[in-house]
Amino acid sequence: MIQLHNVSLAYQQDASALNNIDLKIGKGEFVFLTGPSGAGKTSLLRLLYGALTPNSGQVLIDGQNITRISRSQIPLLRRSIGVVFQDFKLLQNRTVFENVAIALEVLGWGRADIGKKTMHILKQMGIESKYNLATQRLSGGEQQRVALARALVNDPKILLADEPTGNLDDANKNQILNIFKEANIRGTTVVVATHDRRLIEQSHKRLVTLNKGEIVEQMEKETASDHQTL
Amino acid sequence: MNKWKKKQPATIKPFKRPTLAGDGFGGRAGFFLSRAVNNIRQNIFVNVVTVGTITLALLIVSLFMLVFVNLESATESWSERVQVTVYFDKELTSQDQSAFHEKISALSGVSRVSYVTRDEALKRFKIRLQGQEALLEGIRPEVLPTSFEIALKRSHRDTASVENFVVELKRIPGITEVQYGEEWVRRFNSFLNFMRLLGILLGGFLVIAAIFIVSNTIKLTIYSRRDELEVMALVGATRFFIKAPFLLEGLMQGLAGSVLSLALLFGLYEGFLQNAGSFLTFSPASSGFSFLSLEYIAGLLLAGSMLGFLGSLTSLKRFINV
């Protein structure tokens, strides 16, 4: 599903963010990216949804080389990728419903269908009763779930999450982790960047460790072998 | 206990991709229009500020236009006075009259030719000397010259054309004495050119200022919603999809601003007409002070709409990075 070949990325000429990354993530896999701050986790994720293009190397998503597609095709790529951001990136003055529905509106869905599908995903996230509240009035955990609902509402092939549990307490962390696992069971490839050791240990999933822009360690934990690789 | 925990993934039915909200141009336009209207409702304060700014900017421009257009039409009527007169010291026979009339009319730039008889000349003289009729005692028509008065077309009223015309006129056999008030024509034309230049400079300056103010206001309103643009781009909206509602919004703001500014301008115009008598020595209504013509009104509406549209278009470029 995701392949990186010799990918290097530098924001400035002398300071490289990623260095010769080779990584394969199979369809339906669940992978944690970890490493200290500045290791390149966020940069790697941004490459995957087309917010950055690498200076060298190839990035393949679902068989498509996204370093070669035109700018106008990036929106189409993003429709098959759900992204959860560290700072949620919710529209603060809009309601929960509107924040989630926007992901379906851009696909050109009809109003009635958007309503049904959005309420369905909000129910799954356990926040359907707050659908008409502005997101700025929600707690951190609730906001995170709205962000997740938005990422998952169009059943993406890939779910990317950047520090999804950064500011959450343990109960909320577990809930979020469960949502990831459920999405993964339904067939979504999940990539989570985090430096939350406990989250990684609890979940027994494949682990890729980055440091200074390079992959320093890869650990397969239990499950990886169950999934078919590309 | 949270509800979502009980949910079993197996019970979740996959949704089929539903049909599009609106296919074809009409459906899409309707969708974008409703989005634009929603955006305006949700950001009512920002929109009021933007429309207000556009209104004021266009009001200044249109006020200037109103004054300029009226000055132009006033000078237009003054330029009617640019006329060339050919004098004869004897009364012409009707044959001569029609011969001269024909020859003069054949020259380029002539709009009207009329013959003034001695009696007519005396009548005019009397009108001019009204109140001092004593001076006219003893004057009989025979002492006055007869003449042809020649009015020129608008395009032939500048100094050079008038001089050319006079040269042509003098080539007609029998015409010797021609008067056209050279000095007056020259002064009048240089005044006209000066006024036009001033108008273009001032008007251009005002238009540039209006464009600058409006485009910056729109830039600010879009800047205040850059997170929305970012989120739309991240969930896979195409550039056109992101832009369209904002462009429509800009168009509507521009249109609303221009309608409001025209309404205000009309109010000012009416108020001026009603009250001008108390501080002006002449009545502006009777001297032909009129409101902008339909062409100008349509032009202003179009300009306002385009201002909003193009302001949005150029501002959006900076904030969409898809």
Image (cartoon, coloured by chain):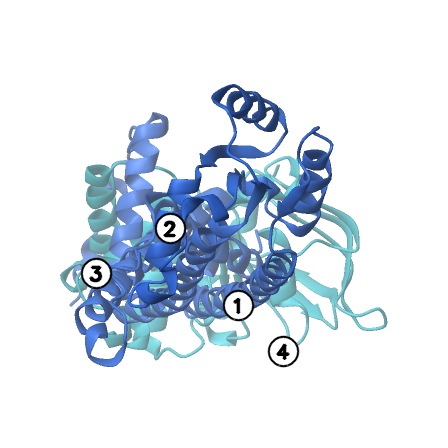
Q: Quick check: can you spot residue A79?
A: no
- Asked where in the image residue A217 lies, by quadrant, the reply is bottom right
Residue B46, disc: none
Q: Colour of chain B?
A: blue
Q: Label 4 belongs to which residue? A: A37
User: Circle 2: is it few (<14), some (14-19), or many (20+) Cα within 10 Å?
Assistant: few
| SS for dot 2 | helix
User: Circle 3: is it few (<14), some (14-19), or many (20+) Cα within 10 Å?
Assistant: some
Tell me residue B317's x, y (percent): 56, 56
Residue B124, disc: 2
Question: Residue A198, relative to residue A186: is it above or below?
Answer: below
- Real-space Cα distance between discs 3 and 2? 98 Å
Is the C-beta separation of discs 3 and 4 under 8 Å? no
**Letter of the chain that mark 2 sits on in the rendering:** B
- Is circle 3 on the same chain as circle 2? no
Tell me residue B153's x, y (percent): 54, 38
Q: Residue furthest right?
A: A14
- Real-space Cα distance between discs 1 and 2? 56 Å
